[in-house]
Amino acid sequence: MKFCNSIFHPFYVQHWLAHHKHVVIDTKHIGEHGKCSEHLRLKTLQQYPKNTKALLNSSMGMGANISGLIYQYALLVFTPLPYCGLVFWYDKPWSLLTYLLPSLLLPLSTIYHKYLHMSDVSRRKKIPWCFRWLLSDAGDQVVKKHFMHHYMNNDRNWNFIVFADTITDLFDSTNLEPDDRTIEYMKKLGLETE
Ligand SMILES: [Zn+2]
Ligand SMILES: [Zn+2]
């Protein structure tokens, strides 16, 4: 039990307790800079002293350095998701794509995660050439889906993983489109909606 806890808890802290909370209470700063304010950063580090490393390696759940990436891939080894693809392989060979591919891409998505949180203006200004595809229509969908992941249906969309929604839609259609309320809120934050 303790072993499992030491593997899963840091991610829970960095992703759910830190990042998801920061996005809601520090929307403006994150929208502009792609990271939470220094004050909130220090407060979070004090709040979770046992998870300092996880928080620092993931920039408060916003990204990942090499150690953070290695940790996230190690985490996949312990989660059932990648194995679902193997279990269903016998019946439906393409199920491997549904579970395995998005799982493998998940940690990599943390590299461009912060750009998904920026306002439209900041994203256009700060995005490096390698992630400029995020400014395309398809990229815009990724941004929208990630926004939804934070504000609603956060148990549904694969959101920030490119093509993952398309792949999961082959099996079931649990991926949702933004409703009017969400779109309205996104407009307020300067996120382009059309
Ligand atoms: Zn999340
Ligand atoms: Zn996020």
Image (cartoon, helix red, strand yellow):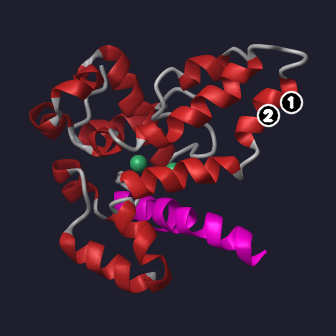
Q: Is residue 148 above or below residue 40?
A: above
Q: Nearer the viewer, residue 73 or 132?
A: 73
Q: Which residue is mark 2?
A: 84
Which residue corresponds to the image point at 26% horizontal and 35% vertical from the top-left? 191
Label 1, secondary structure: give it: helix
Is 168 drawn above or below residue 54 in the view shown? above
- Tell me which amino acid carries mark 1: Val
Side of 48 where 44 appears, left or right: left
The residue lying at 23 percent from left, 26 percent from top is 130
Q: Main secondary structure of the magenta part?
A: helix
- Where, quadrant-wise, is the N terminus in this rendering? bottom right
Residue 113 visible within the image: yes
Q: Evaluate if marks 1 and 2 touch, with contact meaning CB atoms under 8 Å apart.
A: yes
Magenta stretch, residue numbers: 1-23
Could you say where residue 136 lies in the image, as x and y percent from the top left? Answer: 27, 17
Location of the C terminus (image quadrant): top left
Q: Is residue 36 left or right of residue 55?
A: left
Neighbourhood count class around disc 1 (C-alpha, 10 Å): few under 14, some 14–19, many 20 upward? few
On whether residue 35 falls in the magenta region, the answer is no
